[in-house]
């Protein structure tokens, strides 16, 4: 892998750090509580009343997860093309770029979490619903390959509606690509931690998001295969109230821990510390 | 004669009906009595039929291909297993919770040599279709597939995967049993399974449910099969809030075997008999068999390390991006 | 492993080859049909009316499974002791020996099935309910070790009420022993086929009987963990009609094929032929 | 003071009550007024108490040990995890179907060094007992245990297993999800898991459900724990059709730690504080910690090959037979 020239490059800052401009209030998306921007930001965009965890941009997530000034983007130079010349794809992507200040739906890079070096990937649902096209798949795969090559744990924050339709079959193949990279990461015995955030569905949940050694999730996140709308169409099936949420997936054995946002960083650090320490019984 | 003809096959079925009519004994007798050379007329009509068929089937639109791929007379996995392999012994169960009949598999022989075969299985009559959930596997089906794949690995037999599904099951039970996890696990494990794998997309290659059994060293695809990230109907509803625009979506999705080959997802497009696989399942099976045998012969020469490195490289290069 | 001296020894014939003496009729244990001995034997002790598969002794099973005159017992010299001095154990064993003409609840040996050499083990439910004590565990483990050492497939016909209480903890440990041997057999890539026959429950079902690469079962056999009686005690649970049968276990993914007795030999031969042939892709 | 005393503990609780009585302030005042040396009398009673306790607890019958092992105040897995390990991070789920709370496990630290710990978890209050199915795991629990054990293997951390269950769940759901298969799979995989494993039987070692999490390189057992192929009640019903003869069955089954050691099933019996683990959980935890640390230190010196060969040999020799 050649990533020399861009490896040390700093990513440009997000254009829209927050959906709530300084000094103005917003309403909780879940309970309707009026949330004052400063409190809301201080509370990591978690509603102080109902504890609803509002979605974060990739930049916001990084800021509250990794040690200050440690994130160094990798593969930021990768750009999507329009291999199918799919209707409206270029326009949509352009709007997403403008809205998020990102070039794609995932940021990958190296960083430290409480001093522990990691390779980290953070999805941004604001960029075309976090959908996985060629660049997302390629970035995730390269991040894993870097983890395997450098012996660094890999942490992935997921948020996605699934594979990106606009890249057709090539988007679907990113499921295979990221999973194959996860297989090699596993064979290299490198810790791979997934943090499922709202929402993680479809082809992302059915590929690299389900392959962590450890799976954490934020409370109340939508997590599922087909999306609740599809599930609801089943004839005569009564769906449980928590269908396709973190809590449902936890009950069904798919998640290790549901971790509130304010504890996520320290849980990650604790976990990484437990998994990476020296080997007691070498061959 | 064409059963269950599609709209685009109308010129064909009309010609076929005409020819059939002329072949009726009464017509033959009548013509003989009148001294008319009916055979010559039939010959003309038949060559016209051939011309029309070639024209229609070589220029099917993506949506027409989708219809072909879903044709209820199209051969399914077990049809090809019967036609291509000997001694097939179906295995069952995931050793965890259930036996999902949307997936079938087991050991068999290809020209005498043991192989393992696994496939998604649609069905024709209503009861069997329900039993097999229309070929849409739940977690139990994907886990059964993985269990059988691991037997192939253990016993160092090549693995043949038949893909034919509208997609994975997406109901409450699927979610409860972790269908996403099961798909992901298959993608991961098949990528490093230590035995040669040949995949054939024989009908519908529907999204993640198809892909979960389509990772291998060679991916073959029948001429009129389709392979797509989403169904044309689903795509049309999302894009235009109108599932009736599935035809436009099929165009946009580039879901044909020819496109899949151009995109590098498929290595070889296997030609179908004129009019589609269901017109001549035996000939189709023979074409598949030849292509599979050829692939396996090539793969058998490789060391496991080379095989896995090349399999990984094959998957890794898929996609379109600029650096 | 040293098994030189007894390796070639022929096992003595069973004293009670059949429970239906020549010329006399018996009743089907399931439907009550009168079964004439000669027909019944000819039909491999399957009721011609209801297809109930009656239990077989180990000798009967061998006779209808392996090629004539090919079975050579191994480890027939192993004898149980009474490590716990358990009430009535010695008496019970003595009666079992007299009744079955066997020294223990499983016979192991080498044989051929349609010409394919195998290591085979056959349980005899008539010997103390096929219960697994030290000798059963030891014989099964040695059979598997022989399979691994000689590269011969292993076929196990199971029939057991579980671990043998009368040997206490040492009986329980046979579950670990047979499973550990199965693990090594697996690592050696040797085919291991289990045939579950009526009844296979408790500690045998929860150890080597569940570890076959391929699991076959006879129709209608009782197969389960705790025995139906125990299961029935659950409060408020309605048990399915086929609870703890071959068919129930098949539905729940635990069995590959339910094979009628008359097809068992040819299915085994077909399967063995498919699994043992030359390797197409060596390292 | 003894809570929830058993019949065989009556002499002890009577002495304890007497001493407590004499220690009441009123009694003390009264004695002082009368010039009686109450402290001397208490000393006498206390040494008598010690004598009686030693006598009672060193000669517990197997049935009395069974009662001790099931004592509701006896420390459970998570109690020891809290007392022995730091930084425990509980993991959940089997990645297949569910999260069985009868089994707990995850990474933690033992004197700073990372380990993985898994155990069967009973509970005291009714709701938690139901949630944990009284410590009786279903297939999901055994599969969770195996998943966590494989993480220990992947990350090359030693594995500590706490055993405390009346047995595996034996209800319809258990059977539907293949509890037998799950137990067997654990027995098989733990036998060849490529990391050191230390097992501690802390309370009830009930049959296959216990064994499914008790395969390792060293098996330790608390002094008053029991380990048996079948419950004494079950054994008595089968032998004498009378579950009330459980005491006789307990004798016959030789289910004590001392017998388990004689039979070679257990390597080390860890002494409990006088009166049992629940009289001093901290002291018990310290004893366990020392024994586990010592075992792990020895095991850490071995190569994986030696470790696995010795583990296999350890299991292989169990049993009693004549050649
Ligand atoms: Zn709120
Ligand atoms: Zn009958």
Image (cartoon, coloured by chain):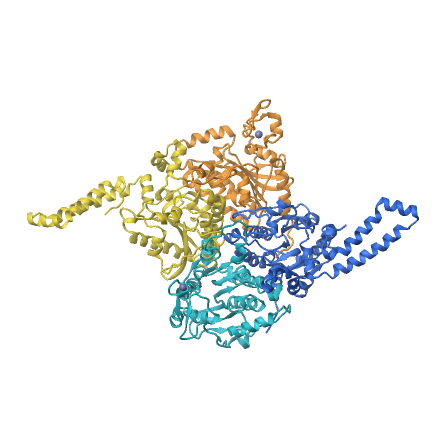
Chain colours: A orange, B yellow, C cyan, D blue
Of residues D132 and D130, which is closer to you in this image?
A: D130
Q: Is residue D275 left or right of residue C196?
A: right
x, y percentage for residue B302?
44, 56
C268 in relation to D197, above or below: below
Q: Is residue B204 left or right of residue A138?
A: left
Of residues A244 and D233, which is closer to you in this image?
A: D233
x, y percentage for residue D41?
87, 53
Which quadrant would residue C220 be assigned to in this image? bottom left
Residue at x 53%, y 49% (from the top left corner): C236
Q: Is residue C153 left or right of residue D91?
A: left
In the displayed orientation, state which residue is furthest to the left: B34
x, y percentage for residue D268?
69, 60
C170 in relation to B310, above or below: below
x, y percentage for residue C139?
55, 69
In the displayed orientation, state which residue is furthest to the right: D35
Residue A209 shows up from this direction:
yes
């Amino acid at each position: 892998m050649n990533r020399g020239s861009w490896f040390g490059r700093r990513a440009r800052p997000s254009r829209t750090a927050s959906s709530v401009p300084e000094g103005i209030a917003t309403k909780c998306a879940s309970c309707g509580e009026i949330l004052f921007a400063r409190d809301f930001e201080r509370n990591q965009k978690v509603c102080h009343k109902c504890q609803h965890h509002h979605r974060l941009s990739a930049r916001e997530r990084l800021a509250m997860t990794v040690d200050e000034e440690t994130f160094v983007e990798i593969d930021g130079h990768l750009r999507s093309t329009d291999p199918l010349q799919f209707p409206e794809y270029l326009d949509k992507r352009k709007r997403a770029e403008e809205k998020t200040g990102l070039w794609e739906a995932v940021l990958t890079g190296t960083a430290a979490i409480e001093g522990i070096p990691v390779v980290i990937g953070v999805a941004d649902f604001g960029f075309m619903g976090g959908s996985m096209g060629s660049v997302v798949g390629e970035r995730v795969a390269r991040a894993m390959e870097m983890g395997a090559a450098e012996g660094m744990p890999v942490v992935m924050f997921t948020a996605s509606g699934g594979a990106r339709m606009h890249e057709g079959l090539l988007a679907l193949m990113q499921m295979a690509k990221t999973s194959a990279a996860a297989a090699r990461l596993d064979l290299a015995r490198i810790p791979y931690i997934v943090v499922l955030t709202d929402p993680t569905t479809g082809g992302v949940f059915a590929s690299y998001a389900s392959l962590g050694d450890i799976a954490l999730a934020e409370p109340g996140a939508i997590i599922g295969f087909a999306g609740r709308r599809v599930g609801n169409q089943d004839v005569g099936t009564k769906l449980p109230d928590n269908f396709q949420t973190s809590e449902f997936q936890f009950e069904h054995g798919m998640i290790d821990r549901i971790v509130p946002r304010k504890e996520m960083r320290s849980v990650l650090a604790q976990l990484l510390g437990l998994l990476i320490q020296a080997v007691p019984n070498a061959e | 004669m064409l059963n269950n003809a599609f709209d685009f096959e109308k010129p064909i079925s009309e010609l076929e009906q005409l020819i059939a009519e002329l072949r009726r004994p009464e017509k033959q007798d009548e013509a003989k009595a009148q001294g008319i050379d009916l055979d010559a007329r039939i010959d003309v009509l038949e060559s016209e039929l051939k011309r029309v068929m070639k024209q229609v089937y070589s220029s099917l639109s993506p949506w027409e291909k989708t219809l072909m791929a879903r044709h209820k007379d199209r051969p399914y996995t077990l049809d090809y297993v019967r036609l291509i392999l000997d001694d097939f012994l179906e295995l069952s169960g995931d050793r965890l919770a259930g036996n999902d009949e949307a997936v079938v598999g087991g050991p068999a022989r290809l020209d005498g040599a043991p192989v393992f075969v696994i496939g998604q299985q649609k069905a024709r009559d209503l009861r069997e279709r329900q039993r097999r959930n229309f070929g849409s596997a739940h977690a139990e089906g994907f886990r059964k597939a993985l269990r059988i794949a691991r037997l192939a690995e253990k016993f160092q037999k090549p693995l043949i995967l038949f893909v034919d599904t509208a997609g994975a099951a997406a109901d409450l039970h699927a979610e409860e049993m972790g269908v996403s996890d099961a798909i992901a696990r298959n993608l991961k494990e098949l990528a490093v399974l230590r035995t040669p794998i040949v995949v054939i997309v024989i009908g519908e290659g529907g999204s993640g449910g198809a892909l979960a059994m389509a990772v291998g060293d060679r991916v073959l695809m029948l001429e009129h099969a389709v392979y797509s990230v989403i169904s044309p109907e689903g795509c049309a509803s999302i894009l235009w809030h109108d599932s009736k625009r599935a035809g436009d979506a099929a165009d946009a999705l580039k879901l044909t075997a020819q496109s899949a080959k151009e995109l590098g997802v498929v290595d070889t497009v296997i030609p179908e008999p004129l009019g589609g696989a269901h017109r001549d399942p035996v000939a189709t099976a023979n074409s598949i068999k030849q292509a599979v045998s050829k692939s396996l012969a090539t793969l058998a020469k490789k060391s496991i390390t080379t095989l896995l490195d090349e399999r990984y490289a094959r998957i890794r290069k898929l996609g379109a991006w600029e650096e």
